[in-house]
């Protein structure tokens, strides 16, 4: 009797026997397990309502979407687990899997890290500082600094910030002497900068600034931009904002991962993170232009006074910066190493940019007939 003429019962026995005989061969193939989601808990250094926390969530969403469920990042606002300035320690210890902040927040551990956010950056804009970081040796230097501090973190610097205001004041400042004895908030090496200029500086986290102004603990303060400042409530405690400053003219954000946990991720997920950082950097800069300009226009319409910081104060900032870096480069070899690397990169790239870029203000004034703002007079309403 051929196989074709076997009864149904016989065929069932034949197949069962074949399966038993081939069992060893079948089990020899690797089992394909269902991919499990890697869940990571992050915290930002920003209040939940701040646009900066929104940027942190934007990055997380991009990673979550690109990984198709293989990696899920949840971002908590500042203070959910630790205070803002304690974030890097929490990430290093594994209390948190990662975080979102700025490099300059860790200047209390090593002042060299503040060069990624504080000061005039030799005339580089924030995007040029990113170029130095990724193509001029900055990234390797930051990794070296973190390793020297025994911090188990993987850092991604991204997100170029526009020039930050000098800050919010009870009355406009018109000369350097107006800063003498002023109770002022800033962070990073800007603390040393304004101390050198005579201010009494208190480096408070973002969420604590406006309450401190309201209680009279601060006379003036800076945070970052029109949207953040408005959301944090600066216009409720001050009607005068001084625009333009060298204290934080070229800062960027930082995304942190616990390095041990990051290294354990498969190469596919690491590639997704890397590309999500790049994409988020571009998207953040575009969103900032749109949102900051809207909030700026709405605050001007609400009779908030915006003044250009006088050139005399800007020049005094540069002079004070010279003194600070002279001291730091003499005392701190790590600071000097970073400073010299940034200087060398800036000497070449700033010359190229300054020679190449057209004066955009000329075109703007041609089309909108907006005169230059006086040093100590409110900006004209558009």
Image: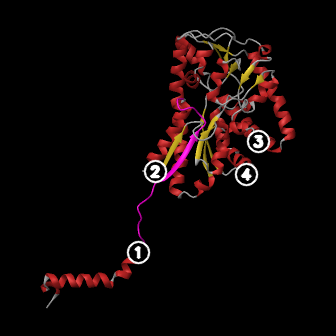
Horizontally, residue 116 falls left or right of residue 10, namely right
Between 62 and 105, the residue placed more toward the observer is 105
- Indicate whether residue 44 is drawn in magenta: yes
| Mark 3 lies on residue | 110
Label 3 close to label 1 by CB (< 8 Å): no
The disc, 2 or 4, on the residue closer to the chain's N-terminal end is 2
* Residue 87 image-quadrant placement: top right
Instruction: Judge the density around disc 4: few (<14), some (14-19), many (≥20) Cα neighbours within 10 Å.
Output: few
Alpha carbons under labels 3 and 4: distance apart: 12 Å
Residue 277 shown left or right of residue 168 in the figure: left
Does the CB distance between marks 3 and 2 fall below 8 Å? no
Whether 32 is drawn above or below 59: the answer is below
Mark in front: 3 vs 2? 3
Q: Residue at x 64, y 27 (%)?
A: 208
Residue 150 numbered mark, or none:
4
Span highlighted in magenta in the image: 28-49
Residue under pointer 2: 67
């Amino acid at each position: 009797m051929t196989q074709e003429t076997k009864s149904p019962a016989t065929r069932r026995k034949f197949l069962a026997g074949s399966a038993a005989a081939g069992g060893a061969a079948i089990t020899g193939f690797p089992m394909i397990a269902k991919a499990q989601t890697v869940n990571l808990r992050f915290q930002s250094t920003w209040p939940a309502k701040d646009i900066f926390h929104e940027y942190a969530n934007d990055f997380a969403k991009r990673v979550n979407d690109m990984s198709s469920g293989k990696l899920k990042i949840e971002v908590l606002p500042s203070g959910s687990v630790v205070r803002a300035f304690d974030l890097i320690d929490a990430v290093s210890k594994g209390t948190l899997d990662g975080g979102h902040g700025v490099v300059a927040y860790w200047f209390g551990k090593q002042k060299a890290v503040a060069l990624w956010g504080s000061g005039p950056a030799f005339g580089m804009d924030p995007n040029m500082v990113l170029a130095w970081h990724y193509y001029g040796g900055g990234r390797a230097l930051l990794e070296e600094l973190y390793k020297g501090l025994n911090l188990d973190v993987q850092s991604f610097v991204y997100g170029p910030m526009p020039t930050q205001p000098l800050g919010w004041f009870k009355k406009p400042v018109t000369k350097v002497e107006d800063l003498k004895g002023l109770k002022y908030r800033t962070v990073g090496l800007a603390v040393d900068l304004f101390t050198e200029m005579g201010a009494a500086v208190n480096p408070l986290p973002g969420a604590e600034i406006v309450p401190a102004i309201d209680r009279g603990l601060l006379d003036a303060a800076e945070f970052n931009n029109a949207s953040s400042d408005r959301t944090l409530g600066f216009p409720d405690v001050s009607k005068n904002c001084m625009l333009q400053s060298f204290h934080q003219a070229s800062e960027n954000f930082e995304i942190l991962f616990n390095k041990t946990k990051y290294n354990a991720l498969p190469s596919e997920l690491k590639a997704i993170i890397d590309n999500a950082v790049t994409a988020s950097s571009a998207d953040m800069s575009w969103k900032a232009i749109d949102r900051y300009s809207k909030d700026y226009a709405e605050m001007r319409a609400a009779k908030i006074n915006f003044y250009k910081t006088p050139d005399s104060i800007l020049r005094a900032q540069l002079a004070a910066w010279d003194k600070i870096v002279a001291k730091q480069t003499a005392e701190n070899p790590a600071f000097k190493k970073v400073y010299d690397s940034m200087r060398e990169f800036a000497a070449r790239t700033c010359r190229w940019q300054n020679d190449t870029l057209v004066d955009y203000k000329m075109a703007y004034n041609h089309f909108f007939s907006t005169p230059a703002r006086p040093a100590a007079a409110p900006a004209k309403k558009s």
